[in-house]
Image (cartoon, rainbow, N blue to C red):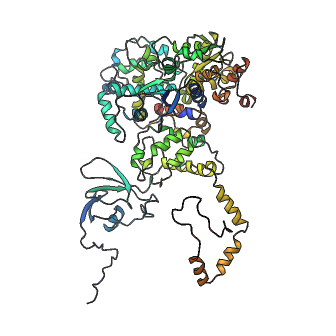
Amino acid sequence: MPIEISEKTIKHEFIEKVSQLSGQDIFKCFQCGTCGGGCPMSGQMETLPRRIMRMAQLGMEEEVVNSQTGWTCASCHTCTANCPRGIDLARVIEAVRLLTLRKNINMIEVSKLPAETIRELPQIALVSCFRKLTS
Amino acid sequence: MKVSYYPGCTLKTKAKNLEEAAVASMAALGVEFQELSRWNCCGAVHSLADDDLIHHVAPIRDLIRAMDQGSDKVVTLCSMCYNTLARSNLLMRNDEVKRKTINDFMTEETDYHGEVDVVHFLNFLRDMVGWDTLRSRIKVPLNGLKIASYYGCTLVRPKDVAIEPVGERIMNEFVEAIGAVPVDFAASTVCCGSYQVLAHPEAVADVIGRIIESASAAGAEALILSCPLCEYNLAKKQDELVRNGKIAGKLPVFYFTQLLAIALGLGPESYRLDLSDVSAIECLKARNFPVESAAATA
Amino acid sequence: MSAPARQVATGDRAILPEGAKTIPIYVMGKRYEVPETLTIMKAMEYAGFKFLRGAGCRGGVCGACPTVYRKEGDYKLYFGLACQTVVEPNMYLAQIPFYPANRAVFDIEKIEPVAESIHALYPELFRCVACNNCTKACPMHVEVLDYISAIKQGDIARAAKLSFDCIQCGMCASRCMGELPQYHIAQLVRRIYGKYIQPRAEHLEKRVAQIESGRYDKVLDDLQKMSHAELEKIYKEREREPDMAPLGTWMPKDTQYL
């Protein structure tokens, strides 16, 4: 599927924002794919981290923000640990999540969770889940 | 010996087995765990945004409690708490600007500059108690029990807070010290899926299946870990995985502190099998280790 | 010489006490000159406000009049009760008589008295980031962060004790980053604690049983039939434990009603 990339489509502000929030130089990524290779959640991601990085480099804001990648990520830092260019990908993915969350959008509705689930889960599961998936 | 101890919320409820086994074991070795007074939830995860300071306040507040109570180190059992406390501690030690902003924000607290060391219980066991001392106090060596040591993520990543340099020896050393046989397996640091058990349970089931298969294929008879969320994911998902054929059979899961308590010859009340899966109880019974009679027959 | 005519406030005209100095305060951004010794509540009424909401017991315990204010030249926010806080020059205030904090529906008769019940009713509890805004906003100096922490840890007793002084004013919830309704959660905790967990006062239960068995019927009956003079007599002659008597050192001579 052809994608148009031109000065018209590159969202510079978005690149700036992701870079600032994550504190990472996303242009260091040379697309080796080691991140997605080690990712435990990659089986459920329709867009692997490598592609997210490429799209971020190309300022494809909509595609990056609308992808499910960040919402499937478990923040395990395997990508960060393995990246040969020393990019802290966990931070980049967190930055992408925050672009949505900081608009006061929740990815799970806390009040709609079944009571049984809340009773059963260890508190750290609830605390960490709400931190990563709610605003 | 006394040492400051940070439990974390889960260890007071769902993961009492992790805590009580540790406290009892340490008492038997002459170490008193002094729980911090007035501690709060650490937040479970480290905030990864460059401009976010408020999410560091919770763990730093706990470190300030430790400092104000005269401690220079705080020991913790829960892997997620360890990771969060340690990373925020590093931030306060290394980032002058953020340190000042956070200290200025917390007007009601003493200023903190990283005075307290955050230590995971495994490091404490190795460095302050010592494997030789531990070995000499073993009353019930777990002879021949093949144990896979599961680290998960938060004990080993990112590397500036890892409990040891790359190599994953410390848990194997512990296994050897309690008289059992360590089994190396490929998935020992593969993430269990963590909080995604809430939002993407199928993805978690997948990765749990892989971890269990990896350990079982390497010959493990039991798996040990240090995190209540890993325990929940690894132990609670197994019935479902056996049902849909993703794993051949169940692998008993223990907190490493439970096996420590057994090896030190402490009674079943200290290792709280009432909170463990039935497969864990069966595993112990099969080897004639004492199990909590009320729970086993309930 | 006749007494000077007494001035009476009729509601459309406020009276300045003689010799009183006035100071400026700002209510919702508008400037008013009010006597300097008044509480915020009285000062606002002096200025002509009539409280339809935001006033209750006027005694610092009902939680109806929480007020947020700043002082001159400072960004800092202060929180107090209008009926208890005395005005200061250039105080800049607004009231928050009600905050739409979440309140879960539950049946206290059917609820299981464990922490998980509270967690399930208020899952937003786990959005707390320990920022401490709640404690800072509390006019009763309740340790809100600590009791929320205790609830997360499953310690119902501790949370009940720490939140005891809460007057349900709602300011904690108004400042909360995680959108927790702290005061509603705490009330549920105290209700569970009081109904299911707190040890019963055995001596009270015993006494109630004695009363219900009719042990005191006769003496109460006799008292009701006594004349005023007789009552006065037995009142004056009553036995009374001396003030500050050490525990266990005094017993009345007449022990029949103990």
Instruction: In the displayed orientation, state which residue is furthest to the right.
Output: B297
B129 relative position to B68: left or right: right
Residue B139: image location, x then y, percent: 65, 18
Count the numbered circles shown.
0
Query: Is residue C124 in view?
Result: no
Instruction: In the displayed orientation, state which residue is furthest to the bottom.
Output: C1
Residue C255: image location, x then y, percent: 66, 67
- Along the viewing direction, whichever of B26 and C63 lies nearer the viewer: B26
Q: Is residue B215 above or below residue C245?
A: above
C137 relative position to B250: left or right: left
B285 relative position to C247: left or right: right
Residue B176: image location, x then y, percent: 59, 12
Instruction: Tell me where residue B162 sits by quadrant.
Output: top left
Q: Is residue C166 above or below residue B179?
A: below
Instruction: Tell me where residue C16 sits by quadrant.
Output: bottom left
Q: Is residue C154 above or below residue B155?
A: below
The residue at the point 50 percent across, 38 percent down is C126
Q: Is residue A9 above or below residue A109?
A: above
- Along the viewing direction, whichever of A91 and C36 lies nearer the viewer: C36
Q: Quadrant of the N terminus of chain A?
A: top left
A116 relative position to B99: left or right: right
- Along the viewing direction, whichever of C30 and B2 lies nearer the viewer: B2
Residue C145: image location, x then y, percent: 45, 43
Query: Is residue C68 in view?
Result: yes
Q: Quadrant of the C terminus of chain A?
A: top left
The residue at the point 57 percent across, 19 percent down is B207
